[in-house]
Image (cartoon, helix red, strand yellow):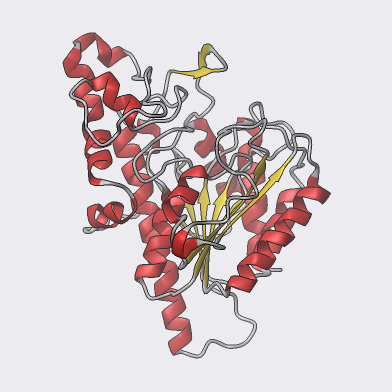
């Protein structure tokens, strides 16, 4: 397994987020990734590399995110500081949003209004380094997907021996991405790395790609991006949106629309779910991927399903993550695994590497 490390991740370092009506220290911190990196040094599962930015990264970003959104995110920090030099010592948080019956087609001149237009929560601070960190993660996702696609083509041309493992890669990056939609950020996410990886696999000629999201929180951004497409199946196992963030998407009756009808599967589970019930949902998701006839897999890997996670509510234990890796490997597909959530910081590294070790061991 190749590991693509975003060396720019530390540039995004939020001070505070709005959480349940209070301004609190950010849960999404650079140490999350550093713990994974440290555990990978202790238990290597493959070479760790920091890839250069692809020359066509902007073109790939534009396949997933709208031009006006990308322009805003790229320039937002400079605009924020230009309003008042004192802002350089403060993170920018949204404070006003277009509700139902409000227009979103007209781009406001006011900075706060545009922050609200392109966001869906007040818990995602925009900092001086948010854009370069998010862009660095996108570069890793694109490069990882291309590496997997190239290895898959090479193996096919060489008629790879039976029993050999399909190509795989891990995208070690933050901020995470699966809550970012075509034209909005939130849930700590700015650019959707899993969606970018899926699109790159499609661009490489793989006709059917599946995205399997195992983060505690629904992958609302990924669902929104692919909801009307039949070439990318989206499956998400997550906390029930009746009680769990992001609340307004992720119900079981959301099955896709238009050409994408039938190509979205949500498997919401109640708070307190343990591994046996969670794994049953994983089996259902895996069966959907198999029925779809996926030729490649993208895994949005959140380990906030862990029993000690401070903002989540499932009961998985560290030992369970090895089995998750083995279950994913059993699909036998070229796979890109993308790091998403997980906020029990001290345990994040162990849990993530347990998944990667289990995956590398095979199903």
Q: 55 left or right of 237?
A: left
Residue 157's quadrant in the figure? bottom left
Q: 35 left or right of 102?
A: right
Q: Residue at x 44, y 56 (%)?
A: 226
Rendering coords of residue 228 (x, y %)? 44, 58
Residue 75 versus residue 218: which sits nearer the camera? 218
**Image quadrant for the C terminus?**
bottom right
Q: 57 left or right of 264?
A: left
Q: Residue at x 66, y 32 (%)?
A: 312
Residue 127's quadrant in the figure? top left
Q: 358 left or right of 79?
A: right
Rendering coords of residue 283 (x, y %)? 73, 61
Residue 99 versus residue 141: which sits nearer the camera? 99
Q: Residue at x 29, y 57 (%)?
A: 60
Count how many numbered circles sit on residues in the image.
0
Q: Residue at x 42, y 72 (%)?
A: 149
In the depicted structure, whether residue 25 falls above or below residue 61:
above
Q: Can residue 53 be seen in this snapshot?
A: no
Q: Can residue 147 be seen in this snapshot?
A: yes
Rendering coords of residue 26 (x, y %)? 50, 22
In the picture as drawn, the residue positioned furthest to the right comes out as 276
Rendering coords of residue 176 (x, y %)? 47, 40
């Amino acid at each position: 397994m190749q590991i693509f490390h975003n060396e720019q991740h530390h540039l995004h370092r939020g001070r505070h987020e709005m959480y349940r009506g209070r301004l609190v220290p950010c849960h999404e911190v650079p140490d999350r990734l550093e713990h994974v990196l440290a555990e990978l040094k202790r238990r290597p599962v493959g070479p760790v590399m920091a890839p250069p930015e692809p020359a066509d990264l902007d073109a790939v970003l534009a396949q997933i995110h709208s031009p006006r959104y990308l322009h805003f995110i790229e320039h937002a920090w400079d605009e924020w500081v230009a309003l008042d030099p004192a802002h350089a010592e403060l993170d920018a948080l949204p404070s006003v949003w277009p509700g139902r019956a409000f227009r979103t087609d007209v781009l406001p001149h006011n900075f706060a209004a545009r922050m609200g237009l392109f966001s869906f929560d007040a818990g995602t601070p925009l900092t001086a380094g948010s854009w370069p960190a998010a862009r660095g993660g996108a570069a890793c996702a694109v490069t990882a997907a291309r590496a997997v696609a190239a290895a898959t083509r090479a193996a096919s041309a060489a008629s790879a021996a039976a029993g050999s493992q399909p190509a795989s890669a891990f995208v070690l990056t933050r901020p995470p991405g699966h809550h970012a939609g075509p034209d909005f950020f939130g849930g700590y996410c700015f650019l959707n790395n899993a969606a970018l990886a899926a699109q790159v696999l499609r661009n490489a000629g793989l006709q059917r790609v599946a995205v399997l999201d195992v983060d505690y929180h629904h992958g609302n951004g990924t669902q929104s991006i692919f909801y009307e497409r039949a070439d990318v199946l989206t499956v998400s196992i997550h906390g029930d949106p009746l009680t769990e963030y992001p609340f307004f998407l992720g119900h079981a009756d959301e099955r896709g629309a238009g050409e994408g009808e039938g190509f979205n599967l949500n498997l919401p589970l109640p708070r307190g779910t343990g591994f046996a019930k969670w794994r049953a949902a994983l089996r259902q998701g895996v069966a959907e991927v198999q029925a779809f006839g996926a030729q490649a897999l993208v895994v949005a890997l959140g380990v906030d399903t862990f029993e000690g996670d401070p903002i989540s509510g499932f009961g998985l234990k560290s030992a369970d993550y090895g089995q998750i890796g083995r279950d994913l490997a059993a699909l036998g597909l070229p796979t890109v695994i993308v790091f998403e959530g997980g906020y029990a910081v001290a345990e994040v590294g162990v849990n993530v590497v347990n998944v990667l070790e289990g995956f590398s061991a095979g199903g």
